[in-house]
């Protein structure tokens, strides 16, 4: 484990001496999750940067790739847990790069739909294998049984968070 995380645990122990009821293990697990997420995100961004992508844009483009037809940017915004403004900015950027195309709605001029161009489809076909190889390399430290157990445990914690009255996370 890196030095910074060890320092965090030492700091946590100092707090626990003053406040003995501190849930040390749970705080460590929470912090470890944040560090893991940041490291995974940075690693994926580095892997995808060679394709002109980051994790956010990759996910959005994969949603478009998997969708059989054009979709409304609002739906993409919802799926991405991102603001409509941010999605609009991304779509404009992708249109300029030739990865997506916008189509006006035939019965409502205010609505727009987006879909991948052939160039965008080819980009995803090139980027996904590189991302998958990196993901397999990272998670390869776990046996299939350990990976299944970790998935189950993380899902259980996530369900607990959702069960607590946190409507913004649903």
Image (cartoon, rainbow, N blue to C red):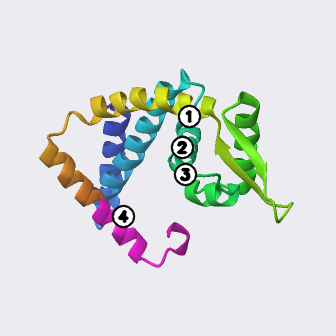
What is the CA distance from the residue labelled 3 to the residue labelled 4? 30 Å
Reading the image, the residue beneath label 2 is 65
| In this picture, residue 34 sits left or right of residue 6 | right
| Relative height, residue 63 to residue 7 (above, below) | below
Residue extending farthest front: 106
- Mark toward the viewer: 2 or 4: 2
**Mark earlier in primary sequence (3, 1):** 3
Q: Main secondary structure of the magenta part?
A: helix
> Badge 1 is on which residue?
121
Q: Which mark is residue 158?
A: 4
Give the residues in magenta: 155-170
In three-dimensional space, the C-alpha distance between marks 3 and 1, rounded to whole angstroms, equals: 12 Å
Q: Residues within 10 Å of mark 1 (few under 14, many from 20)?
A: some
Q: Nearer the viewer, residue 93 or 166?
A: 93
Of callouts 3 and 4, the N-terminal one: 3
**Mark 3 or 4, which is nearer the eye?**
3
Q: Position of residue 149 (x, y in %)?
A: 18, 54
Number of other residues with Cα within 10 Å of mark 2, as a class: few under 14, some 14 to 19, many 20 or more? some
In which quadrant of the rendered image does the N terminus lie? top left
Q: CA distance from mark 2 to mark 4?
A: 27 Å
* Label 4: element kind: helix
Q: Residues within 10 Å of mark 4 (few under 14, many from 20)?
A: few
- Could you tell whether 112 is left or right of 109 in the image? left
Q: Nearer the viewer, residue 57 or 151?
A: 57
Tag 2–tag 4 contact (CB < 8 Å) = no
Q: Position of residue 52 (x, y in %)?
A: 60, 26
Label number found at residue 68: 3
**Nearer the N terminus, badge 2 or badge 4?**
2
Q: Residue at x 82, y 65 (%)?
A: 107
Q: CA distance from mark 1 to mark 4?
A: 32 Å
Label 3 CA crowd tier, 10 Å (few <14, some 14–19, many 20+):
few
């Amino acid at each position: 484990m890196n030095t910074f995380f060890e320092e965090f645990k030492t700091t946590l122990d100092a707090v626990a001496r003053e406040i003995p009821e501190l849930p040390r293990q749970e705080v460590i697990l929470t912090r470890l999750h944040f560090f893991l997420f940041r490291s995974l995100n940075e690693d994926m961004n580095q892997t995808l940067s060679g394709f002109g992508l980051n994790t956010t844009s990759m996910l959005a483009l994969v949603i478009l790739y998997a969708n059989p037809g054009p979709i409304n940017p609002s739906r993409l915004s919802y799926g991405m847990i991102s603001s409509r403004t941010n999605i609009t900015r991304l779509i404009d950027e992708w249109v300029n790069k030739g990865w997506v195309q916008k189509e006006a709605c035939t019965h409502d001029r205010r609505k727009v739909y987006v879909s991948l161009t052939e160039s965008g489809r080819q980009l995803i076909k090139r980027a996904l294998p590189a991302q998958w190889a990196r993901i397999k390399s990272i998670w390869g430290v776990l046996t299939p049984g350990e990976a299944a157990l970790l998935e189950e445990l993380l899902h259980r914690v996530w369900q607990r968070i959702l069960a607590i009255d946190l409507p913004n996370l649903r």
